Amino acid sequence: MPMYQVKPVSGCDVQVDLPTCMYKLPNVHAQHGNSCSPEHALQNGEVDPAVKALEARQDEIMRKLYELKAAVEGLAKTVTTPDADLDLTVSSSLSSQVCSSSTFKGTTDLDTLLGKDLGALRDIVINANPAQPPLSLLVLHSLLSQRYRVLSTVHVHSSVTSVPPQLLSCLGPRHADSYARHMFQLGFTLIWKDVPKLQMKFSVQNMCPIEGEANVARFLFKLLAPYPADPAAATLVDSWLDTAFFQLVEGSTKERAAVLRALNSALGRTPWLSGPEFSLADIACYCCVLRTGSAASAPANVQRWIKSCENLGHFGPAKLLLQ
Amino acid sequence: MTKEAVQGATEEEQQAQSKKAMKKQQKEAEKAAKKAEKQAKLTAEQQTTEEDDFAKDRYGVPAMVQSQQKLDRELVRVQDLTPEKADQLIWLRARVHTSRAKGKQCFLVLRQQQFNVQALVAVGDRASKQMVKFAANITKESIVDVEASVRKVEQKIESCSQQDVELHIERIFVVSQAEARLPLQLEDAVRPDGEGEEEGRATVNQDTKLDNRVIDLRTTTSQAIFRLQSGVCQLFRDTLTNKGFVEIQTPKIISAASEGGANVFTVSYFKTSAYLAQSPQLYKQMCICADFDKVFCVGPVFRAEDSNTHRHLTEFVGLDIEMAFNYHYHEVIDSITDTMVQIFKGLRDNFQTEIQTVNKQFPSEPFKFLEPTLRLEYTEGVAMLREAGVEMGDEDDLSTPNEKLLGRLVKEKYDTDFYVLDKYPLAVRPFYTMPDPNDPKYSNSYDMFMRGEEILSGAQRIHDAQLLTDRATHHQIDLEKIKSYIDSFRFGAPPHGGGGIGLERVCMLYLGLHNVRQTSMFPRDPKRLTP
C-alpha cells in the first residue's frame, strides 16, 4: 500500500434516515470499511495483541522442538550399533537415521521428494537389461533399504527368455512382510527386460521415464541425501558420474586409462572423489571400475580408494553379481 | 435340266429376276455347305475327343467311398511338402481352395487345414485338354485325391504356405463335391477389418460367420485360434498336474444355485426342477474338505445373464482351481499366477505360427507378462486411478471402463498385460470370501487381469461354518438354501482358496481379439442357440 493508514475521522455507525419509497441495496462501501477497520485501527508503531500472541506461540513451539531434538539426539547416542533392536513401528525414521548417519548427512523426506502419499505404495520401477546389470543402482538400493522400509521385487519381462539366478536374487532375500505391500514406504521393482537403455518409471502421470543408469542413480541418491548445496561441488559429482558411465564403461581402452589417471590425481588431493565426504561420485566410479575389471591395474591412489570403498561395506550386492 | 429350261425360257424377260434368284441360290448353297462343313467338323471333333482322350482314366468322380476297398496308398500331408520331396510322385488328399484355368493349364490351390500348396494341371503327355477342363470345373471346397509330382519352384509362391514347391498333377479324383454356391467365401472371412472397405471388397459379418461356422472354422484364422485354445488347455493340465493337482469332474446338474441364486438356468428334472451349475466351486471345495489337497477341473459353466457384450457367453469353459494352503492365501495366488505364466510361456514358445496367423487378420501387440507376476493391492489401484482423475470411493467396485483404464496405467508403468489385483473391499465380494485379518473393510480376495479385462476372480474361502453363517446372515442370504454348503465345513476343513478362469476369455485376450465369440467354437449367448 503506497500510503500510511489513518483512523476514520468519523465513527462508522452514523445513522442516516433513508427514504422508504425505493428498494434497498446492500451498502457497497460498508463491507470494505468494516473489514478494514479493526486491522488498520492500529496506528503506526502499535502492535496488534493477536500478533503478539502468535509470536509467543511460535516461540513456544520452537522451544519444544529444540527440546525434542535434544531428546532424540540423546536417544541416538545411547543406540550405538545399527542393528540394535528398535521397534520399527515406533519410529522407523529414527532407526534409519541411526543406521545411515555414518554414511550420509542431511535429512530427506519421501513426502517432499516424491509427492504426497496417496495411501498407496510409491513404487519405483526400473527396467534393466540383464546383459548390463546396473551395479550402482543395486548399491543405492541396499543403502535405501537401510534408510527406508523398501519392498524389493525382481521380475523377468517376457521379452527376456532366461536370466541367470544371481540376477533374480540381486536385491537380497524376500522381506518377511512382503505379502503386505501397504506396510512399506517405498517400492523398488527391478524388471529384467530387453531394453536398449536402462529406464526408470515412477509416476506415469506426472513424470516422464528417466533413461540411463547415471540419471537414475542421481534420482535415487537424492532420496538418500540432498545434493551438495554448493553448485560447484554438485557439478563435480555430476561430472564424475558422467565420466564413469560414458568414458569408463563405454569408452575405449585409451579413454579408460585416461579416466584412471584422472581418478588417481583427484584421489591424491582428497580422500573421496568429491571432497572429504563419501558421495554418489564414489559409488558410481567404484561400480564402473569394478565392472570394467580395471581394479587390479589401477594406480596407487585408486587402489587405496578401492580399499576404502570396500571397507564401507555398501558394495556387497554389486560384488556378488560380478562373481 | 429344268433349271436350264427355265433359264432358257425366261432369259430375256426375267433377266433381272434370274440374277437375283441366282444370287439367292448361291448364298443358300454357300450356307448349306458351311453348315455341312461345321457339322462334319463337330462330329469329327467329337470323334477325336472320344478317341483321343488318352487321359480318361486319370480324372473323374469315382463312386462314393463306402469303404469298398482298403488301399495301402500313402497320403502325404500338405505341411510335409518341402523341397526335400522334390521330384517324387505322391498322393495327396486336400480341399480345392481356389482354381483358375488359363488356356491349356489350370492352377489349383490345394488346402489342408492352415497349409496350402499350388498345384498345376497342364495339357501334356500326362493330362489331356479334357482333364484340364474337368479340373477347372471342380467346385471350391471340394475334397480331391491327387497324384502329383513335387517340383521345386524358382520364385517363391507368396500366396501359399508351402512356398518352395508346387505339384504337377497327374491324376485327380473328386472324393466329395461341394455345392457351387458357398454361403461365404473363405478369402472374405479372413480379410482384415478395414482392408475390405478400402478396396471395395467384401468382408463377412460375425453373424454370417457364426451361422456357417463349419466353413468359417476352415479359415486359417479359426484353425489357428482353436489350435491355440487346445494348447491353453493342454498347458493348464500339464502345469497343474506337475504341481501335484488332481483333475476332478463335477456334476453340472445341481439342486441348488451355488452362488447366491441369481443368473442360473432352470431345467426340468423329472417331477421337479434343477439348475445348471454356475461354477464348480462348491464341489471343488468339497473335494478340498475330502483331503484332495489341490484340485482343478475343466468343464462347461452356465450363466443365465442376459448381457449381449463382447465378453459374456451363457455357456463357457471354466478352468477352475482350488487348493488348500498352509499359512497364507498368497500361496494360492502364487500357484495360479505361476500356472498362467507357464501357459503364456508355452504359447509364446510353441504357438508362434498360430499367433502370427491370427495377427495377420487381427493385428495386436504381442502379449507381455512378468515373472513372477506383478501383484498390486486394491488401494494402490484406486490411488493410480485417482491420480489419473477418476473419482471413486475406497470401497467401490471397479467399473469395466475403470478396469480398462487401470490396465492401461499398469501397462504404462510396468509393461505387463497380466497382473493381480489383491485385497478387494469385502463389500463387493461374495459372502464366502474371507475378511482381511487387519482391516474389516477389505478381504483376502483377488482378481487377475489380462489386457485390462478380468479373467479370474478368486479368494480365500471361509472354511469355518460359524463365520460362514455369520457372513451369509450379513448378506441376508436364506440359510436354508445354502445349508448343505455350510454343512460341508462342519467336519474339519483345511484353509483353502482358488479361482476360476474363463478359457474363451484367456484365448481372446492373449490374442488381442475383440469378441469372445471368436474364441468359442459354437458360442452360446442370449441370442444364439445354433449351430
Image (spheres, coloured by chain):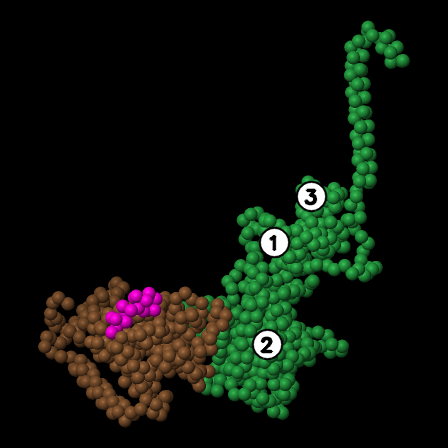
Chain colours: A brown, B green
Three-letter code for the amino acid on which mark 1 is drawn = Gln
Foreground residue among B316 and B133:
B133
* Residue B105 - label: 3
Three-letter code for the amino acid on which mark 3 is drawn = Gln
Same chain? Circles 1 and 2: yes
Looking at the rendering, in which quadrant would you find the N terminus of chain A?
bottom left
Foreground residue among A209 and B283:
A209
Q: Residue at x 56, y 87 (%)?
A: B495
Q: CA distance from mark 3 to mark 2?
A: 53 Å
Q: Is label 1 in a helix, a strand or a loop? A: loop
Circle 1 residue: B163
Q: Where does residue B447 sit, x and y in percent of width and height?
A: 52, 75
Q: CA distance from mark 1 to mark 2?
A: 36 Å
Task: Provide the residue span drawn in magenta.
Answer: A248-264
* Residue A82 - label: none
Circle 2 residue: B239
Foreground residue among A269 and B328:
A269
Q: Residue furthest left?
A: A45
Q: Earlier in the sequence, mark 1 or mark 2?
A: 1
Q: Residue at x 80, y 46 (%)?
A: B56
Looking at the rendering, in which quadrant would you find the C terminus of chain A?
bottom left
Q: Earlier in the sequence, mark 1 or mark 3?
A: 3
Q: Earlier in the sequence, mark 3 or mark 2?
A: 3
